[in-house]
Image (cartoon, rainbow, N blue to C red):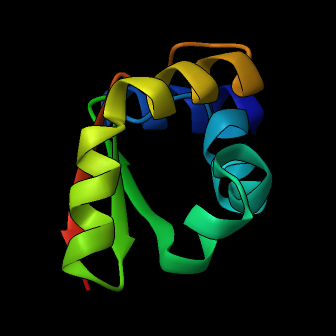
């Protein structure tokens, strides 16, 4: 079933299933406790990770730090499956 799921995810523009699981399960570890208090991963599409945040100021800070966050995710996940971020205020 694993290969079938991966083909489906690829067709939908999502990264590898292991990347999706890691991002959702390890969010505080990946981005740090302070950022994780104010944000959460929402979805993946076409290698873009959508992040929800609880405040417009945090959304601005995350947009400003996008390159650094992408670099950190690439190192921690061991891949460049996440190529862009979309930040939304929930």
On the rendered image, what quadrant is the C terminus found in? bottom left
Q: Position of residue 37 (x, y in %)?
A: 61, 78
- Name the quadrant containing residue 4: top right
The mark tally for this picture is 0
Q: Is residue 2 above or below residue 29?
A: above
Q: Position of residue 16 (x, y in %)?
A: 59, 28
In the picture, which quadrant includes the N terminus?
Answer: top right
- The residue that appears at 60% across and 39% down in the rendered structure is 5
Residue 57 x/y as whole percent: 24, 72
Q: Position of residue 47 (x, y in %)?
A: 34, 29
User: Which residue is at 60% across, 29% downward?
Assistant: 73
Residue 13 is left or right of residue 16, and the answer is left
Q: Residue at x 31, y 55 (%)?
A: 61
Splitting the image into 4 quarters, where does residue 32 fall?
bottom right
Which residue is nearer to you in this view: 57 or 51?
57
Instruction: Name the residue located 28 percent from the left edge and 83 percent from the top edge.
Output: 55
Q: Is residue 44 above or below residue 71?
A: below
């Amino acid at each position: 079933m694993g290969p079938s799921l991966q083909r489906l995810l690829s067709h939908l523009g999502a990264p590898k299933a292991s990347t999706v699981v890691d991002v959702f399960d390890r969010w505080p570890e990946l981005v740090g406790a302070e950022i994780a208090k104010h944000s959460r991963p929402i979805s993946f599409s076409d290698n873009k990770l959508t992040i929800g945040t609880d405040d417009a100021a945090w959304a601005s800070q995350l947009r400003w730090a996008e390159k650094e966050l992408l670099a950190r995710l690439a190192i921690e996940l061991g891949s460049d499956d996440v190529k862009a971020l979309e930040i939304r205020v929930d």
